[in-house]
Image (tube, rainbow, N blue to C red):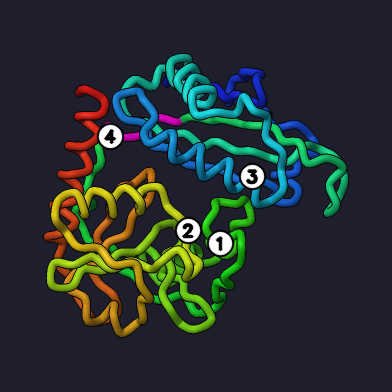
Amino acid sequence: MATLYVNNNGTILTADAPTIHPGNRGYLYGDGVFESIRVMNGRPLNVANHIRRMLEGAKVIKMRTPAFFTTSFFEEKIIELLRMSNITEGGRCRMSLDRATGGSYLPESNECTFYIEVYPYDVSHFELNAKGLEVDIYQDIKIQKNFLSNYKTKAGLTYVMAAIAAKEKNLDDVFLANDKGNILETSCCNVFIVSNGVLYTPGLDEGCLAGTMRMQIINLAIANGIKVYECTILPQNLLAADEIFVTNAIRGINWIGGYRTKRFFNNMSRKLVVLLNDYWERELGI
């Protein structure tokens, strides 16, 4: 296997030894934001939208980002790591912005540092899961909507506990709800339900993550004549749906096979995966 490399704020290091500095606030306090980016044919996808969300998230948590933290700057750094790590087909990248070292809960500075890591991925296209996911609703923690809800912050313990709960119940994932019982997302994905050929997904004002793949699926659907509504999703809507699928930047689209006693089709999921791959093949000139 080829050696993998990381970029710690401009210093490139091999990933087979410690690369995070002592006192890193992302590690100590979850004080940062991050993005997960899919790589196809050795190139990172949807970089502009990922960087936009990351920089907006950094601003929301009152970190100061330098003017040179642009899409082209980070894309160049990601591609450099991919080439050095010999990732020429499928891959994934995780990129973080952490508040500068110093202080305890009250930071000494609001400056920030970046950290980029890359990994190979089994396939170089978006692939629909062969077997539908089995899911239920996670009851132990409710998501409270706040000004951080739409961003990928490093405070991820709710999602960790939800994923562990799913595994303990022999499920593939669980839906997370707010204190009103409205469905927002899963432990790692945005949620879409399909009814009579129309897509419904929780609105950002409900408090779900503003997923980059969520945005792309909405745009792809509308461009191909499929109606999409951002609205409140109730548990009873899950049971009434013809189909449910979930999305994230790395996996693309995964279809839900069962929620409790209800079984689902995957016709829309299959159609959208084809549209998604076609889009990126055109964009990359494959």
Q: Is residue 135 above or below residue 254?
A: below
Q: Is residue 91 above or below residue 144?
A: above
Q: Pick the quarter of the image with the C terminus.
A: top left
Residue nearest the observer in this picture, 251 or 145 = 145
Find residue 229 and report its image quarter.
Answer: bottom left
Residue nearest the observer in this picture, 14 or 62 = 62
Query: Residue under circle 1?
Result: 149
Query: Residue under circle 3?
Result: 58
**Range covered by the magenta-colored residues:** 119-124
**Secondary element at image label 2:** loop
Q: Is residue 217 above or below residue 6?
A: below
Location of residue 266 in the rendering, given as x and y in whole percent from the top left corner = 16, 61
What amino acid is found at the position of numbered circle 4 in the picture?
Answer: Val
**120 within the magenta span:** yes
Q: Find out whether the residues at labels 1 and 3 contact each other: C-beta distance under 8 Å.
A: no
Location of residue 20 in the rendering, given as x and y in whole percent from the top left corner = 70, 32
Looking at marks 3 and 2 on the same chain, the residue that comes earlier in the sequence is marked by: 3
Looking at marks 4 and 2 on the same chain, the residue that comes earlier in the sequence is marked by: 4
Looking at marks 1 and 3 on the same chain, the residue that comes earlier in the sequence is marked by: 3
Query: Residue under circle 4?
Result: 123
Is the residue marked by circle 1 packed among few (<14), some (14-19), or many (20+) residues within 10 Å?
A: some
Query: Residue under circle 2?
Result: 209
**Secondary element at image label 3:** helix
